[in-house]
Amino acid sequence: MTQTSAALRARAEVDLAALRGNVRALRSRVGPGTALMGVVKSDAYGHGMVPVARAALDAGATWLGTATPQEALALRAAGITSRVMCWLWTPGDPWREGIEADLDMSVSGMWALREVVAAAREARRPARIQLKADTGLGRNGCQPADWPALVAAALAAQDAGEVTVTGLWSHFACADEPGHPSIAAQLDVFHEMLAYAEKQGVEPEVRHIANSPATLTVAESHFDLVRTGIAMYGISPSPALGTPQDFGLRPVMTLSASVALVKQVPGGHGVSYGHHYLTPRETTLGLIPLGYADGIPRHASGRGPVLVGGARRRVAGRVAMDQFVVDLAGDTVEPGSTAVLFGPGDHGEPTVEDWAEAADTIAYEIVTRIGARVPRVHLGERPGTGPAEDHQSG
């Protein structure tokens, strides 16, 4: 059932105008010959994949990136026709559907090449594939020792009309740590693996290794395409690199809730499970209807900051599954008042980085873990890309 914005118990407002501005700011950091991929995996880092994808394309992204094939196919089902790359495949995944949807599919090893070739034969059309090199991350990707065999097999499949090798790519391990020696080392290995593949006859449309931190700080890594994930959402990849404002970025998501209850309690009153918080004096408590089932980190119990009644408060006691409490220090706040957990910080509200620090984690985790029962309210959608007014997606 559709609710009005005022009736929402909680909401994650997603400022698509800010997202478009971030894409433009990121594009300004790369050369005119370098394309930008907007990474929209994990429901666009919790922001709502389809509206975000459309806004990113509207602002100049020419590629979209997802982790799973199901995410990529959902973009196609929504009518998005841009180039879409998908990189996290497992045996038995829907390769044929990916081929028929014109996805660019990552191949890291011989098993994947065999599966995509079999699917191409079934589909009777070539698959678009990108070969991923493990240049030092040690996660997905083909090791240098195995690269010659994979390149040879991919070229043979291409000669047979079963695949088209559209790209060569890799991923950094430590680009969010300025000056880390692995950055230069991985670039060297990438250059070597590119040179080998191209000497053998691979003619990639795009070569890419730069993620958000490398896009912001490692210009020599930009090649033909940069993949911007967290930075597109106005969040710095790392405090060591700088704040969002340092890079001309604006946070896109604001998470808020309606205060569900306000009550007066005596001093020494226990609050929430385990009574890890006792009121130091007679005070007022406010109940916020969000909990760890909504993605509020339990590790931030006693520390998570919230703007309520014009002042910053902290979670009092443990975060529970559906709710947590703040000590209002005797202030009177009406039920239904807005509690802001994080946002751009324009009005004194905490930021995503503040919550990451409180939970001893990274900002990526804070936004991506916001659960499905918190409606996403997309602001600033343009005609032709979605509803002209606020749009909610669950």
Image (tube, grey):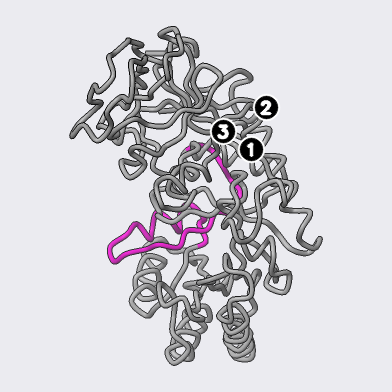
Single out the residue that lies furthest toward the right.
32
Task: Give the mark nearest the N terminus, 2 or 1.
Answer: 1
Task: Give the mark nearest the N terminus, 3 or 1.
Answer: 1
SS at badge 3? loop
Tell me the residue that label 1 is attached to.
55
Q: Position of residue 50 (x, y in %)?
A: 52, 37
Tell me the residue that label 3 is attached to.
343
SS at badge 1? helix
Q: CA distance from mark 3 to mark 1?
A: 19 Å
Q: Is residue 198 left or right of residue 85?
A: right
Q: CA distance from mark 3 to mark 2?
A: 22 Å
| Quadrant of the drawing holding the C terminus | top left
User: Disc 3 residue type?
Assistant: Gly
Q: Is residue 44 left or right of residue 82?
A: left
Tell me the residue that label 2 is attached to.
382
- Residues at badges 2 and 1 in contact (C-beta under 8 Å)? yes
Specify start and end residues of the magenta stretch as a single range.
78-104
